[in-house]
Amino acid sequence: MKIICVATNYAPQGIESGAFQPLEVPVIFIKPDTALLRNRHPFFLPDFSTDMRCDVEIVVRIDRLGKNISRRFAARYYNEITVGVGITACDLQNRLRERGLPWEISKSFDNSAAVGDFVPINSLDTGICGINFHLDIDGETVCGGNTGEMFFPVDEIIEYASRYVTLRTGDLIFTGTFASNRRLEIGNHLEGYIFDRKVLEFWVK
């Protein structure tokens, strides 16, 4: 199992979508399976960073083998979604960027990809393109959005990613972020929602 992640896939908060121009293709990076943090397991702040921040995104689980998948057939390769929280060591990422070095390790360390309980897409009236989701920290909504606002929809991500890497059953796709810009601290309680249904929950320790 691998975790395929899409970098910024929405306009930054406070900026209208038409005023923010994405790249021509999705920006993809991959996390190892050790990055997975399962629902309700605690996240322990590591000792290599003092500036851990998080984002919320919709996660799609691949349920069949595929390579070079056409966009028009992409919906055949997934049936369930959930909310995911990606955690970034921002101070480490900034140091690496300043030196022109790859920054993947700042996003791909152990337990940096929290994943909630999966929900069948056919149980949602909106389908994949109209899903509201959000993240609460300590009872306060800090970020969220709607999948209809993605620059690169799920099927386009699958088409693009499968040109380069074979998708296998159980692979997860983190489809792009809404950054909360909220620093994580010991004692934080994070809850992720699809519409008003809580699908993700964990504590920071």
Image (tube, grey):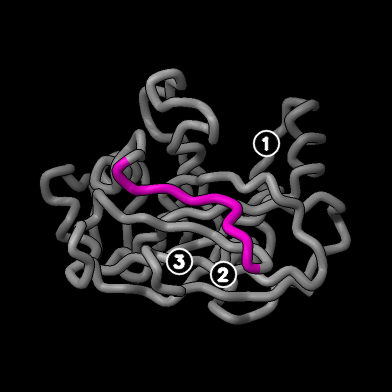
> CB atoms at circles 2 and 3 under 8 Å apart?
yes
- Three-letter code for the amino acid on which mark 2 is drawn: Glu
Which residue is label 2 attached to?
Answer: 191
Three-letter residue code for mark 3: Tyr
**Residue at 32%, 54% in the rendered image:** 166
SS class, disc 3: strand
* Quarter assignment of residue 141: bottom right
Residue 49 painted magenta:
no
Residue that mark 1 sits on:
102
Q: Is residue 124 above or below residue 181?
A: below
- The kind of secondary structure element at disc 2 is strand
- CA distance separating discs 1 and 2: 30 Å
Q: Residue at the location (55% across, 50% down)?
A: 143
Residue at the (46%, 44%) spot, across then down: 6
Which quadrant is the C terminus positioned in? bottom right
Q: Position of residue 204 (x, y in %)?
A: 74, 71
Q: Which residue is mark 3?
A: 193
